[in-house]
Image (spheres, rainbow, N blue to C red):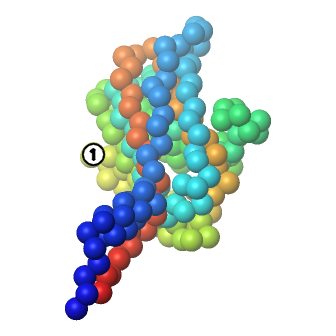
Amino acid sequence: MKHPSAPLCCLLAALCLSASAGEVALPPAPPPAHFDTESVTNAPLLRPMMDRARLLRASVSLWATPSNNVEVAFGTSRGGDGVLLPGDESLAFGWENGAWFLASPTNRVRSPVFAEPAERTLSFRLRVREDGSPVSLSVGDGDLPDAFPDVAAAPPDWIFSRAWDTVRLTVRGTDERDEALSVRLDTDAGVLILR
């Protein structure tokens, strides 16, 4: 029985790992510059990652109060400059007025309202087919594992697009800020068999 050389195995493993995942580096939202308390930051979604993506995972953490708002939005920048302007987003989710929300330009659903301020983390996990159509969706937090059961039962087409090129983080409100966002695009795990 022949065994592949160690350098070849290392190269193949490195290629599999580099093709399988992509963390989106989104800087924290800056302090607000105006009295409206809004601050925004954008990050590009690289075309090779979007073309191969089969799994979108995101989490947003914040000090969740009735008066603050943290929104994660995905879309296509109309100027092609990596800035997602209002109206460019095709998917948005986050925290608003005491509840989690999930939205498109024509749809908006909200979770039940949480009465007490608390540190909260929303986890978003979407699996798509090769053509980008949704297969499964899971959205929730520790106190509400299934925040949008009707949407998760039949994920709509608007929940993902391979044409997206930008993700935006928008923060509003006067309460304490400590939001954190993580976005990751992965391909399906593959199996490499060497004989």
Of residues 39 and 22, the one nearer the viewer is 22
Quarter occupied by residue 61:
top left
Q: Position of residue 52 (x, y in %)?
A: 54, 62
Residue at x-position 54% and y-position 54%: 49
Compared across the picture, whether 42 is left or right of 20 comes to right
Q: Which residue type carries mark 1?
A: Asp
Of residues 130 and 74, the one nearer the viewer is 130
Residue at x-position 60% and y-position 60%: 51
Can you say which quadrant of the picture contains the N terminus? bottom left
Quarter occupied by residue 14:
bottom left
Of residues 139 and 88, the one nearer the viewer is 88
Q: Position of residue 136 (x, y in %)?
A: 46, 67
Which residue sits furthest right? 79
Of residues 5 and 177, the one nearer the viewer is 5
Residue wearing tag 1: 143
Residue at x-position 39% and y-position 28%: 179
Disc 1 crowd, CA 10 A, few/some/many (<14, 14-19, 20+): few
Compared across the picture, whether 188 is left or right of 13 comes to right
Q: Position of residue 32 (x, y in %)?
A: 53, 13
Query: Compared with residue 121, is residue 31 higher up or lower down, i.e. above or below?
Result: above
Q: Position of residue 147 (x, y in %)?
A: 40, 51
| Residue 96 in sight in this render | no
Q: Find numbered disc 1 in the image and state the secondary structure of the residue it sits on.
A: loop
